[in-house]
Amino acid sequence: MTDNPDTRCGLVAVLGAPNAGKSTLVNALVGQKVAIVSAKAQTTRARLLGIALEGSTQIILADTPGLFAPRRRLDRAMVNAAWEGAQEADAICLVVDGRKKKKDYLQPILESLAGRPERKILILNKVDETAKEPLLIAAQELAGEGQFDEVFFVSALTGDGVAELKTRLADLMPAGPWHYPEDQVSDASERLLACEITREQLYRQLHDELPYDSTVRPESYTHRKDGSVEIHQQIVIARDSQKGIVLGKGGSKLKSIGEAARKELTDLLGTRVHLFLHVKVDEKWEDDKEIYEELGLEWVK
């Protein structure tokens, strides 16, 4: 996208277990929100690219689904997408929740990373919530076998250590033209991003009540003549008993979710947004191949 001979551009795969803070870190590195964040594990489903700039360097960050033991078809597709994001990366960042004392859950990930040729960086996240000594011990334990080339201590939430990490990632990127325009921050379409914003609100407002088996599907995305955008979306849940939870008394919860999503989309898109939501019950939505295509996930049998 540029003929400047001094430009650099490369891909960084951001891996880790669910809730390690990968999406928050990608947002911090990009400098604005490109990936949704929630306290619910496995929020990120598809592989999404965040695009960060550091001087004349473009860093393409693959925000991947969390790595975990898959049980369902959707789980398998998400884990496959995570490892796919690491293919041919110029660097791999393993993000670890620095607050967790036990690190046994990381063993399968560490074994999968062993022997890979990419430069590997260990990132201990959430340092603002962790004492210094346990962090140093964790760094020694995880990096002790020489698998990681570098270790960074950051708080993606507060920004501590993020600038230093970004500078280092830029230094590691190879010389070459940028792959995206200067003002582009993500490879996600507005249509998909709009669904993700609504799904984030669904999780934020109902994560204690609504199980993980829900999603948001696009129905239509129309630019009106007055410059505003009309968006119709479908909230899909697995059981009829969940419908009342999403709707709320007199439809109040659905209205609250829609209002919050509409406000964020208005700020994000810089124009007025008309958002229409409705709820559909589909017990087998996780077996719908079309949904996987919408998310950019591979259909895994």
Image (spheres, grey):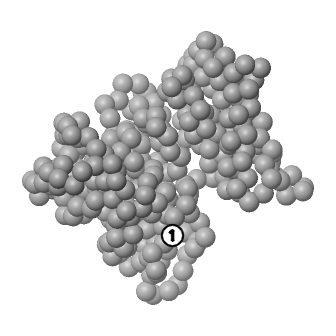
Residue located at (43% from left, 58% from top): 158
Left or right, residue 190 beside residue 81: right
Which x, y percent locates residue 258?
72, 37
Residue 155 vertical position relative to residue 43 in the rendered view, above or below: below
Examine the image and state in which quarter residue 285 appears: top right
Q: Kindly tell me whether residue 86 is visible in this rendering.
A: no
Q: Residues within 10 Å of mark 1 (few under 14, many from 20)?
A: some
Describe the element under mark 1 as helix, strand or loop: loop
In this view, the residue farthest toward the bottom is 5
Q: Quadrant of the C terminus?
A: top left
Residue located at (46% from left, 37% from top): 39
The number of numbered discs placed on residues in the rendered structure image is: 1
Which x, y percent locates residue 217?
65, 35
Which x, y percent locates residue 282?
62, 19
Name which residue type carries label 1.
His
In this view, the residue farthest toward the left is 145
In this view, the residue farthest toward the right is 225
Q: Kindly tell me whether residue 34 is visible in this rendering.
A: yes
Examine the image and state in which quarter residue 67 appears: top left
Which x, y percent locates residue 32?
55, 61
Examine the image and state in which quarter residue 209 appears: top right
| Viewer-side residue, 140 vs 48 | 140
Q: Quadrant of the N terminus?
A: bottom right
Left or right, residue 278 beside residue 88: right
Residue located at (45% from left, 75% from top): 54
In this view, the residue farthest toward the top is 241
The residue wearing badge 1 is 179
